[in-house]
Structures are given as structure tokens and as C-alpha cells.
Image (tube, helix red, strand yellow):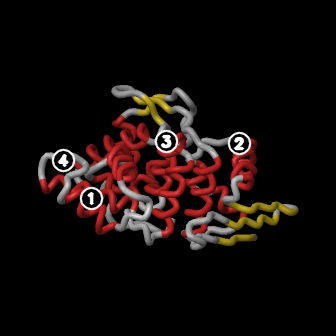
Amino acid sequence: MGQDSTASAHTGRTLMFNELSHILDITPIDCSISEIKRLVYEENILQKSSFSSRKMSFYRLKLLYTLDIQNTAFKTLRFFWNKAPDERPLIALEAALARDHILRYSAQKILPLKCDTLITKEEMIKNIQQEYGKLYTQNVLESTSRNLLSSWVQSGHLSGRVKKSRRKATAGPASLTYALLLGQLSGVEGSSLFETVLVHALDATDTEIQAYLHAAMRKGWLMYRNAGGIIELTITLDLNGEVKKNGHD
């Protein structure tokens, strides 16, 4: 997506949805990254058993989400976190997909699965091995695959503790708008915005996408026009007047 960190959080951790949720729940919306770091390190707000675990948790969360309120993607995540609680798992996934190349690679295995289809750790290992087999040891590939499956459970795309199966994620106007914004931030324009992995992760039909678009327009989050296949899209979120992205074919 063009916003990658070269490292991947998934070689050591998962989506860390619970940790992210806790940070966002107890900090003000304009909380700085330095204050979040202090809270994790000094106040141990994530309740980790050792200081090294606190440091690693902060490092992985930063890889996934930046945690920097000056970053447009994270600032918008915080905006939607309060606006659409039901869509939080998907919003977190979208932010991570834009930054984590291994998670994004695994999407090609998970997203095409039909509902109730089982997915095993062995299948995920084989999938990841094709792209990353020369970079990581077998032990790292196995742990990364476990982490990836856990992340897709956290996002709502899989269910089950031992046997994991595909389910439909919970999407809506907030997660659609966020997907479109992240697409624009990575340089995607026009109709291609609706073909990114971020939009595919919504698990939404074309009819549902249209419904989400109209709902987002009613909320004042975006302006959308499709004139004979020529798409014009403007993100109109009111984040202190700072977020306004335009795109057209």
C-alpha cells in the first residue's frame, strides 16, 4: 500500500486488538505518541509482566498503527474508533494492512475463502513460505502463521479456537471511508480505490458498498459521484479541518 514498515509485527505478535483498544479507551483523542509511550513504559497500562515486554508491545503497536496523532492514518483511526464501535476490529485491521506486508500477503489466502470454510495453520504456513521462506526460519514461519490466524480472528474474518473457519466481517460506512482514505494516502485513485485489499477486507457486496457510501455521505464523511464510470471521491472528514483528500479518474 505504500506505507509499509520494512519490519512486520506478525513475526512476533498479532494484531494486538485488545492492547490497541485499551490504549485508545484510556487516552484522550489528541494524546501524543510520547505520552502513550510513557504510559506503556512507566505506568504499565498494558499490564505486562516485564519492562522488556512493555517495550516490545509498544514497538509492535507502533509498527502496526504508528500511534502518532500527527499521522493522518492514525488520527483518522481514532476518529472512527469513537464513531463506529461495531467496526473497530475491521478498522484496526485496515490500519495494519496498510503497514504490514506479511499481513497483507496473507489476505490473499483468507479473503477469498467462502464462509464456514476451514483454514489450518499448515495451510497458512505453506502460503507464507512461498513468499518468505528464504527470509525466515521454519520456527519463525510457524509462529508468524499462528499470529496471522489470530489476527484474522481478531478482525472478525475467522472464528474458532482450535479449528478456524471463515466468517463475514462486520463492516459499515466508517470502515469503508477509512479504507478509501488509506487507499488515497497510498496513491490509489478513482475506481481503483474500490479494488484494494482494504475494500476487499470489508467482505461487502456491491450493494452493501453502495449503501455504505450513501450512509457515509449522509454523515458528511465523503462526497462521491459516478458519472458514466468516471468516479470523483472527496473525503470530507472534519478532523480539525486537516483531513481532506480528493481523487478522480
Mark 3, Cα crowd under 10 Å, few <14 / some 14-19 / many 20+, is many
Using residue 174 as the reference point, say whether residue 16 is left or right of it. left
**Relative horizontal placement of residue 15, taking residue 117 as reference (left or right):** left
Q: Are marks 2 and 1 in contact (CB under 8 Å)?
A: no
Mark 1 vs 4: CB contact within 8 A:
no
Residue occupying the point 74% across, 53% down: 218
- Work out how far the residue at label 1 is from the one at label 4, CA to CA, in angstroms: 11 Å
Q: Position of residue 157 (x, y in %)?
A: 49, 38
**Disc sitting over residue 110 in the figure:** 3
Q: Along the polypeptide, which appears first: circle 1 or circle 4?
A: 4
Q: Is residue 107 visible?
A: yes
The amino acid marked with disc number 1 is Phe
Question: Where's residue 191, x and y in %?
Answer: 72, 62
Q: Nearer the viewer, mark 3 or mark 4?
A: 4
The span from disc 2 to disc 1 (Cα, nearest Å) is 36 Å
Q: Amino acid at mark 4?
A: Lys
Quadrant of residue 182 within the rendered picture: bottom right
Q: What residue would you read off at disc 4?
A: 48
| Mark carried by residue 23 | none
Q: Earlier in the sequence, mark 3 or mark 1?
A: 1
Q: Which mark is residue 58?
A: 1
Give the foreground label among 3 and 1. 1
User: What residue sits right under mark 2 in the picture?
Assistant: 208
The mark nearer the N terminus, 3 or 4, is: 4
Q: Are marks 4 and 2 in contact (CB under 8 Å)?
A: no
Measure the alpha-carbon separation of dots 3 and 2: 20 Å
